[in-house]
Image (tube, grey):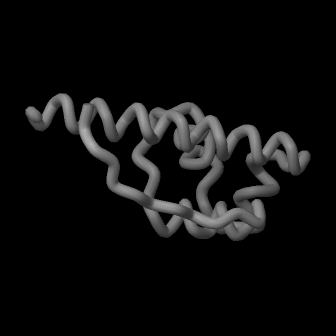
């Protein structure tokens, strides 16, 4: 697999996670500003993560998962 394909696959995964984080924020009736206050993650970063426009740092993922009372599961899957 080329580096470009690998990066596109990771980017697609990031967009899915970003959408999940957005959905959880809305479900919990929190604004981006409220998430910022509770996590210390800059508002612009939260917005970019939710839109899939920014890489998701593991430390941010764990903080956000804790805020939303979720666990993080990472796995390796076979390539198709």
Residue positioned 49% across, 69% down in the render: 59
- Quarter holding the N terminus is top left
Q: Nearer the viewer, residue 43 or 16?
A: 16
Q: Can you say whether 66 is above or below 56 in the image?
A: below
Q: Can you say whether 34 is above or below 47 in the image?
A: below
Q: Nearer the viewer, residue 34 or 76?
A: 76
Q: Along the horizontal axis of the image, is 72 left or right of 34? A: left
Displayed quadrant of residue 62: bottom right
Residue 25 position, x and y percent, is 78, 47
Displayed quadrant of residue 44: top right
Residue positioned 52% across, 62% down in the render: 73
Residue positioned 50% across, 34% down in the render: 15
Give the number of marks: 0
Q: Along the horizontal axis of the image, is 72 left or right of 22? A: left
Residue positioned 60% across, 56% down in the render: 42
Residue 3 position, x and y percent, is 12, 37
Q: Along the horizontal axis of the image, is 34 left or right of 55? A: right
Q: Nearer the viewer, residue 6 or 52?
A: 6
Q: Along the horizontal axis of the image, is 14 left or right of 22? A: left
- Quarter holding the C terminus is top left
């Amino acid at each position: 697999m080329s580096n470009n394909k690998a990066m596109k696959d990771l980017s697609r995964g990031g967009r899915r996670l970003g959408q999940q984080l957005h959905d959880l924020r809305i479900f919990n009736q929190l604004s981006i500003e409220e998430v910022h206050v509770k996590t210390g993650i800059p508002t612009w970063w939260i917005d970019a993560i939710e839109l899939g426009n920014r890489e998701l740092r593991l430390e941010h993922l764990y903080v956000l998962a804790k805020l939303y009372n979720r666990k993080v599961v990472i796995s390796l899957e076979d390539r198709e």
